[in-house]
Amino acid sequence: MLFEEDSGLGNRMGCLTHSATVFLCKQIVEISRLKLPHIDLVQDPIKSIALNSILTESSIEHPVDHIILMKGFNTGFRPQYTFHGRGRIDLRDVWAQKPKGANEFSAYMSIALAGFLNMFLTGSGPGIPYTNGSILPGMEVQADYIVACLVKMQKQDIKMMEVDRDAWNKYNIQQTLSLEDLIRV
């Protein structure tokens, strides 16, 4: 575990944040510290735990002072519940297949899906362009778009609205292409 020697372990509880830092005892320990010579990040499955060591599945015994165990959880957009659209299509089935031009699940402007009438996503729909910082500015833009749609529906007595599949596909392609120049691996 990433502790400073003078951290006063036990005085405060540590927690992980989304910014990939560990906050502990009023000290921030950056993930870059994983590269320090006295720190080991072991990802081999645990076979057994002893008082001062861990034996991994590869039969390597690792002496330890502290252990951090992390459990994965589903952070995907594919819902666990049933949500039907036009023709009884299930949102889970729609997102089980990659839309044209998309790298993963997608929604038009992270807000709407073809085949799902009067459905608007807010907050963090798939394909949302921000991953760091405040989510509020993005939610405000989404809310403005949704309100504009609702005002149009009310003024023109429109009963149902859904995104056009061609517009959705073009948006996915445009979004994917625009991100290619921003990400370097």
Image (cartoon, grey):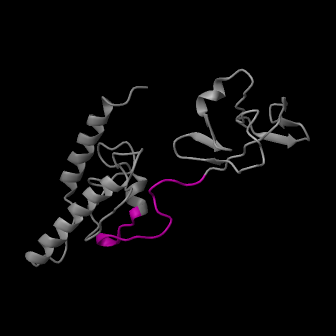
For residue 49, side relative to residue 14 (left or right): right
Relative depth, front residue between 33 and 12 = 12
Residue drawn at 75 percent across, 39 percent down? 45
Residue drawn at (16%, 65%), measured in percent from left and top? 148
Q: Which residue is drawn at the image coordinates 64% and 24% (left, top)?
A: 35
- Where, quadrant-wise, is the N terminus in this rendering? top right
The residue stretch that appears in magenta: 73-91
Q: Which of 164 and 9 is in front in this view?
A: 9
Q: Main secondary structure of the magenta part?
A: loop
> Quick check: 172 left or right of 184?
left
Which picture quadrant has residue 111? bottom left
Quadrant position of the C terminus in the picture: top left
On whether residue 136 falls in the magenta region, the answer is: no
Question: x and y percent of residue 17 in the render?
Answer: 56, 47
Pick out the residue farthest to the right.
51
Q: Where is residue 142 in the image (x, y as percent from the top left)?
A: 27, 59
Residue 32 falls in image quadrant = top right
Residue 81 drawn in magenta: yes
Residue 42 x, y percent position in the rendering: 72, 32
- Most distant residue in the left direction: 156
In terms of depth relative to the viewer, which is nearer, 31 or 129? 31
